[in-house]
Amino acid sequence: GNSVTQMEGPVTLSEEAFLTINCTYTATGYPSLFWYVQYPGEGLQLLLKATKADDKGSNKGFEATYRKETTSFHLEKGSVQVSDSAVYFCALSSKAAGNKLTFGGGTRVLVKP
Amino acid sequence: ETGVTQTPRHLVMGMTNKKSLKCEQHLGHNAMYWYKQSAKKPLELMFVYSLEERVENNSVPSRFSPECPNSSHLFLHLHTLQPEDSALYLCASSQDRLAGGNNEQFFGPGTRLTVL
């Protein structure tokens, strides 16, 4: 079955630091990959996505590249802000698995001024 | 009102109470979902509805009873819950459950449930 593994947090950074959150997956078929973000007290919001190998998703300064050879979809941002403090979830869906979203455990990121 | 809304945002109930959570989506989507988010656990998919028909029930106890009267509304009826059911309950919707693998889901803000 499908599964997603992402680094455990919390990750604590200073403002303007570089952020990387690792995500690897196992999947049946050819999955689409997603990063969702959950700000305090809110639901999940789609941050970015990639639907095929070598695609790069980007939004709000965040980027992630779909790497089929390493089954990875690492999230990066070059210069974080305090407002980026949130929990980040890597997820995938595949038609072969009924298009259900499979989530990783989430990584809490805390950016200090 | 836009997106996916959930009410109430917070709910405290005793183990013998009956309450309902409500979700409404204003996106014209055909599929709706209930998730449970507990501390230190991965997000758990509970139920999936497609075109108002329940298509998935992930071994959820019968004290949770979903209802989908139309494609815009989804309810979760709660009865004789346990303290371990305390969690954030998230509703989501997507255009189509069988959207070719590109199943982007839109989430509501959740209902924070505390069972005493």
Image: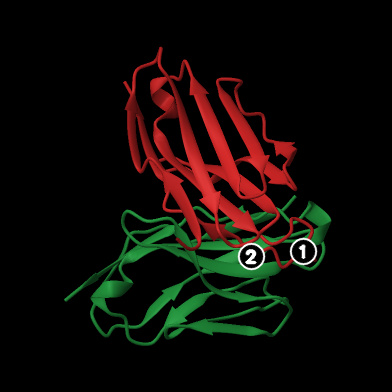
Chain colours: A green, B red
In the rendered view, does A78 fall on the left or right side of A7? left
Residue positioned 33% across, 59% down in the render: A10
In the rendered view, does A66 fall on the left or right side of A52? left
Type of the residue with mark 2:
Glu
Residue B104: which numbered mark, if any?
2
Query: Do dots 2 and 1 share one subunit?
Result: yes
Choose top left, top right, bottom left or bottom right for residue A40: bottom left
Label 1 packing within 10 angstroms: few (<14), some (14-19), many (20+): some
Q: CA distance from mark 2 to mark 1?
A: 9 Å
Type of the residue with mark 1:
Ala
Task: Please give the residue where the numbered disc 1 appears in the rendered image.
Answer: B99
Please give the chain letter of the residue carrying mark 2. B
Q: Is residue B42 visible?
A: no
Asked whether the residues under the numbered discs 2 and 1 touch, taking CB atoms below 8 Å apart as contact, a structural biologist would say yes
Rendering coords of residue A107 (x, y %): 42, 60
Please give the chain letter of the residue carrying mark 1. B
Mark 2 residue element: loop
Label 2 packing within 10 angstroms: few (<14), some (14-19), many (20+): many
